[in-house]
């Protein structure tokens, strides 16, 4: 079969069609104007959300509608009787399979299967035309993981056609799919089944090879071997730091950019998140500081100093009632989130406590003093404070309130910073505040105020509970640590991460599709959250191991470290290589999850929360001098 491929620029789909046997001829629209179209048996048209020249369109439609040749049209604003609006963004929508195989659907795709296409563009038909059979449809706000178990009428309600058949010989999409690998469409196997169906329909053949993935995940070596594990761990740290370097501003003097957003355009270009966040800046400083301490790298230590200088420089308010307040971002200038502020200063505390460097300790205390002054009587703070809406009386009211937010999401790392500052020789007020806050949270446990999931709360509690036990030595606090750690183990996946779980679906973002959204759609989804949950565990488990001396915490640190070695992105694109993304499906072993979050969806890579926290956790035992189970 001789297939004419129009307007291809070296696409993934074009490579698949080449592998199907037969003959494949590539032309631009301009070249096709002068070509004899009768010589071709089928046509594949990449419309790129436009239309071909009317002279070419007329001839193509004659081949298709009069001579009955198989024609695949991708993202054409108009073809035959189909007339579309657009283009529109698909980021908040998902493709759902509507047609079973026995009715003409793609083999291997069941009704309700979901396919996600990053930050694509689509051209929505204004109306249905006679003979249109929809195979895939776009629906907004689908709260499901890999399959949507809804009645057919619900799937079709308020949907937009994504892939459809017109009669027996015309197949059209409203969206671009020609670079389905380059643009990281997921789940990858579901997309390959769909593409194999399209390719076979066009050429009569079967794909014999697939383009190489642009992103692969993790090592395949046996990490149970100590030497292999340690080598792979060090290599992962090197690659992770190279990735972080790519987001530094002026060698860290201007901070670090937030990282990568979820959105990947149809040509495979991922959107950069350019905000300068104080928490990301402080966390990145920690990653470079740890590396510099362990290797003697003067460059890494200089970068750490630059980043720390921004945290305690322009990003910290000085003087007046807000003295010590850390700004959230370069845009959220007058906003303070205490857990973010705490994570910005924790690396300086690690350096003080484990490295003996007290240079920044007074600055840290200044930050913590502001937070303590605005903490409620139960030891917890409200989720955030906004300086423009607070005068001195308003600040006093925060401290006089009976209750803050009893949530690890908002307070756990704040409490951890207070405890570590106390252990560094800081005020007893730090210990008392942290103790009250953690005991408030644990009194409600496991029904704390959750944001993303129950798993997130458990992951965030490991570090502060370990430090609480270290600070007090009380059996009650040790039991709290072990209870949270053991409860977390019930969500462990065989791949090494921890599944998102939310008993009763009580978290604010659980099963949501508007605003900030949990990755959790149903308890039991095999998805790990590397932004809000498991990213905290390497530092947490390493600290618990050091505090308790319990081999079980070493085993859990090593297991979660191995998980991160198996999920780190490898790519020829330096924007991605060495990073970790938010969502990882541990059954599929690829980046995939609910893509609806308004700012930090499945494919995002956060320079501080995710990458720097993981990197610090991979290095922390070595910084302790504990590099094996007997350390």
Image: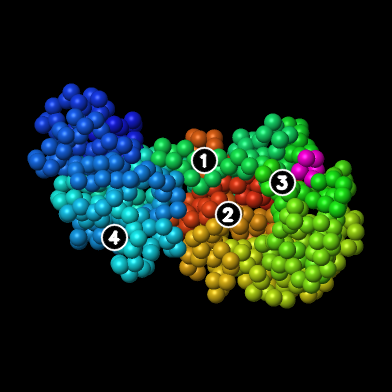
Residue 283: x and y in percent read 70, 46
Q: Quadrant of residue 414?
A: bottom right
Per the image, the residue denoted by label 3 is: 333
Q: Quadrant of the N terminus?
A: top left
Label 1 vs 2, first from the N-terminus: 1
Q: Which disc number belongs to residue 530?
A: 2
Residue sitting nearer the eye, 490 or 136: 136
Magenta span includes 314: yes
For discs 3 and 1, the disc positioned in front in the rendered view: 3
Q: CA distance from mark 4 to mark 1?
A: 31 Å
Label 2: which secondary element: loop
Label 3: which secondary element: loop
| View extreme (left): residue | 67
Label 1: which secondary element: strand
Question: Residue drawn at (76%, 53%), measured in percent from left and top?
Answer: 387
Q: CA distance from mark 3 to mark 1?
A: 23 Å
Query: Does the magenta stretch mainly form a helix, a strand or a loop?
Result: loop
Per the image, the residue denoted by label 4 is: 98
Per the image, the residue denoted by label 1 is: 271
Magenta span includes 313: yes
């Amino acid at each position: 079969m001789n297939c004419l491929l129009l307007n291809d620029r070296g696409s993934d789909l074009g490579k698949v069609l080449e592998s199907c046997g037969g003959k494949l001829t590539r032309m631009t629209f301009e070249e096709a104007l002068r070509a004899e179209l009768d010589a071709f048996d089928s046509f594949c048209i990449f419309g790129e959300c436009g239309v071909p020249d009317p002279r070419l369109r007329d001839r193509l439609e004659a081949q298709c509608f009069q001579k009955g040749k198989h024609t695949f049209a991708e993202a054409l604003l108009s073809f035959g009787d189909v007339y579309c609006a657009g283009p529109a963004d698909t980021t908040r929508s998902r493709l759902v399979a509507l047609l079973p195989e026995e009715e003409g659907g793609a083999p291997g795709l069941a009704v309700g299967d979901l396919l996600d296409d990053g930050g694509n563009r689509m051209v929505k038909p204004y109306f249905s035309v006679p003979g249109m059979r929809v195979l895939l449809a776009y629906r907004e706000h689908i709260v499901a993981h890999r399959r949507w178990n809804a009645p057919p009428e619900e799937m079709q309600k308020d949907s937009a056609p994504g892939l459809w058949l017109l009669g027996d010989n015309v197949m059209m999409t409203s969206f671009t799919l020609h670079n389905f690998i380059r643009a990281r469409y997921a789940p990858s196997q579901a997309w390959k089944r769909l593409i194999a169906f399209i390719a076979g329909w066009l050429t009569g053949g079967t794909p014999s090879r697939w383009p190489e993935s642009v992103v692969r995940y993790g090592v395949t070596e046996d990490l149970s071997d100590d030497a292999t594990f340690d080598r792979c761990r060090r290599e992962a740290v090197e690659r992770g730091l190279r990735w972080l370097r790519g987001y530094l501003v002026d060698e860290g003097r201007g901070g670090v950019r937030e990282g990568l957003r979820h959105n990947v355009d149809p040509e495979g270009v991922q959107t950069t998140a350019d905000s300068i966040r104080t928490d990301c800046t402080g966390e990145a400083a920690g990653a470079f500081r740890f590396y510099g301490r362990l290797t003697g790298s003067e460059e890494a230590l200089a970068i750490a100093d630059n980043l720390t200088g921004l945290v305690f420089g322009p990003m910290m308010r000085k003087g007046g009632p807000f003295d010590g307040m850390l700004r959230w971002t370069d845009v959220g200038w007058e906003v303070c989130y205490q857990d973010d502020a705490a994570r910005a200063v924790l690396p300086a505390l690690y350096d003080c406590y484990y490295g003996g460097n007290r240079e920044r300790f007074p600055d840290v205390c200044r930050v913590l003093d502001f937070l303590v002054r605005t903490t409620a009587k139960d030891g917890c703070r409200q989720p955030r404070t906004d300086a423009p809406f607070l005068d001195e009386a308003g600040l006093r009211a925060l401290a006089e309130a009976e209750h803050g937010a009893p949530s690890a999401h908002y307070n756990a790392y704040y409490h951890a910073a207070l405890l570590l500052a106390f252990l560094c020789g800081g005020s007893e007020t730090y210990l008392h505040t942290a103790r009250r806050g953690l005991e408030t949270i644990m009194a409600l446990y496991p029904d704390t105020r959750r944001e993303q999931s129950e798993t997130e709360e458990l992951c965030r509690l490991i570090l502060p509970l370990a430090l609480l036990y270290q600070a007090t030595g009380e059996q009650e606090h040790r039991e709290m640590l072990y209870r949270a750690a053991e409860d977390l183990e019930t969500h462990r996946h065989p791949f090494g991460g921890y599944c998102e779980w939310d008993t009763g679906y009580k978290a604010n973002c659980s099963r949501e599709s508007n605003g900030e959204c949990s990755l959790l759609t149903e308890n039991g989804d095999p998805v790990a959250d590397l932004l809000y949950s498991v990213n905290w565990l390497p530092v947490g488990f390493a600290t618990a191991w050091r505090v308790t001396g319990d081999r079980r915490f070493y085993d859990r640190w090593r297991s979660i470290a191995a998980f991160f070695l198996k999920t780190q992105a490898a790519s020829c694109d330096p924007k991605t290589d060495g990073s970790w993304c938010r969502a990882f499906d541990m059954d599929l072993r690829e980046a995939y999850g609910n893509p609806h979050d308004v700012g930090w969806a499945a494919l995002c890579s956060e320079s501080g929360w995710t990458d720097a926290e993981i990197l610090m956790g991979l290095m922390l035992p070595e910084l302790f001098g504990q590099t094996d189970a007997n350390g």
